[in-house]
Image: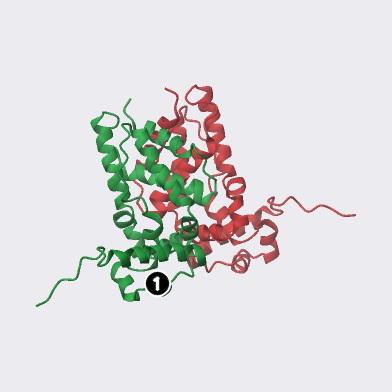
Chain colours: A red, B green
């Protein structure tokens, strides 16, 4: 007579899920990362705290999903060239780092990742997995076109793309030019292309 | 009858300077970034706090210099190729991020940079300036050899190199392989070479 709980990560009620995500993004902008609490998110979303904890391990994971996974469900770009596909990915990444929520969330999120070994250990397997999945599709197509080798190191390229955008915009505080995504895409795709 | 103070940034006594830097790096490893204070550094170095504040604006600047400028005075690599020169630079960068002091200092340092707009505004002009100067020399030589265009964007390449190493090692926590610096150097130099 026991029934399994739904798998972690699948919302029972899509409306609650959406309300929690929206409340989180709004709170981070309004009060900052440090002052954002699971209790405040739950109150604003009109759900109980247990509903939040059923889906997310804690604040860092919730804020990450609310702020930095906004394009995970977008169609994977298929422009016909590696450079074009990477440019689309990078434009989304640049946009995420520039949103008010992204700007407000990032420093505290980094500090929490750095301070919590269990959370940090999940960056590759959990937080970066959807981005890697998208890049793998793009690389497979590029390999089929003969643009890159089939063994191109996906993780290293992903870290380089994300690291470049993070360092340039979030750390150094550059205002990205309209050319930024295209410049980076051209540099990295040329760097890994077969010639 | 007034004499100017020595310009900020030039130590009056090289022994004090060295003692302060050593004390800072040791303290960060022993007690962590958060618990490292200017008072504790001064006591360990055997100098007054005013001697520290005469040279550094505060903890973040002092820790940055103690931990992340260890190769600023090394000879600029001149291997004969852009890829070779970048590989040497990247090896030094990878080593800095892997030291106990680098690992201990980085999260707190990032949080302080993010939380202090005045400090953050000086990342490009102050903290990254020596690295950029070294890269400019390497790029000038590469341009003279015809490897890259004279207008290659130095800041963007610098941010990409530093961001890739930061993201891969410090954030995601990868143990760098012996090939890492060479792989990144090959990718980025191919990405900007004239062909």
Is residue B48 or residue A169 the one in the foreground? B48
- What is the x, y in percent for residue A168? 38, 49
Q: Is residue B98 left or right of residue B70?
A: right
Residue A178 in sight from this viewpoint:
no
Which residue is at a point 68% across and 61% down the rendered structure image?
A: A53
Q: Chain of mark 1?
A: B
- Report the quarter where the C terminus of chain B lies: top left
- Residue extending farthest to the left is B1
Label 1, residues with CA under 10 Å away: few <14, some 14-19, many ≥20: many
Q: Where residue B126 sits in the image (x, y, percent)?
A: 30, 57
Residue at point 51% right, 63% down? A28
Q: Residue furthest right?
A: A1
B19 is higher (above) or lower (below) than B132: below
Residue at 56 percent across and 44 percent down: it is A72
Q: Nearer the viewer, residue B95 or B169?
A: B95
Q: Could you tell me which quadrant the N terminus of chain B lies in?
A: bottom left
Query: Which residue is outermost to the front?
Result: B15
Residue B89, located in which quarter of the rendered image? top left
Q: Position of residue B62 (x, y in %)?
A: 37, 64
Q: Quadrant of residue B87?
A: top left
Could you tell me which secondary element the residue under label 1 belongs to?
helix
Q: Nearer the viewer, residue B42 or A55?
A: B42
Q: Residue at x 50, y 22 (%)?
A: A145
Q: How many numbered discs, if any?
A: 1
Residue B20, position in %: x, y? Answer: 36, 66
- In the visual, does A151 lie left or right of B83? right
Q: Quadrant of residue A183?
A: top left
- Residue marked by disc 1: B38
Asked whether residue B128 appears in the rendered view, the answer is yes
Q: Measured along the vertical axis of the image, is residue A31 above or below residue B89?
A: below
């Amino acid at each position: 007579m026991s029934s399994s709980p739904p798998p972690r990560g699948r919302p029972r009620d899509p409306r609650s899920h959406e309300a929690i995500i929206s409340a989180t993004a709004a709170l981070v902008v309004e009060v900052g990362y440090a002052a954002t609490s699971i209790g405040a998110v739950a109150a604003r979303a009109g759900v109980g705290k247990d509903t939040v904890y059923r889906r997310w391990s804690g604040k860092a994971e919730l804020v990450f999903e609310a702020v930095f996974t906004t394009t995970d469900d977008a169609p994977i770009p298929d422009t016909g060239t590696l450079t074009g596909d990477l440019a689309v990915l990078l434009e989304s990444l640049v946009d995420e780092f520039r949103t008010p929520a992204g700007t407000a969330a990032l420093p505290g999120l980094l500090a929490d990742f750095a301070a919590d070994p269990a959370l940090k250990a999940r960056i590759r397997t959990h937080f970066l997995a959807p981005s890697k999945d998208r890049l793998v599709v793009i690389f497979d197509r590029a390999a089929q076109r003969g643009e890159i080798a089939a063994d191109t190191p996906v993780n290293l390229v992903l870290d380089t793309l994300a690291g470049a955008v993070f360092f340039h915009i979030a750390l150094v505080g550059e205002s990205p030019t309209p050319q930024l995504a295209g410049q980076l895409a051209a540099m990295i795709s040329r760097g890994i292309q077969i010639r």
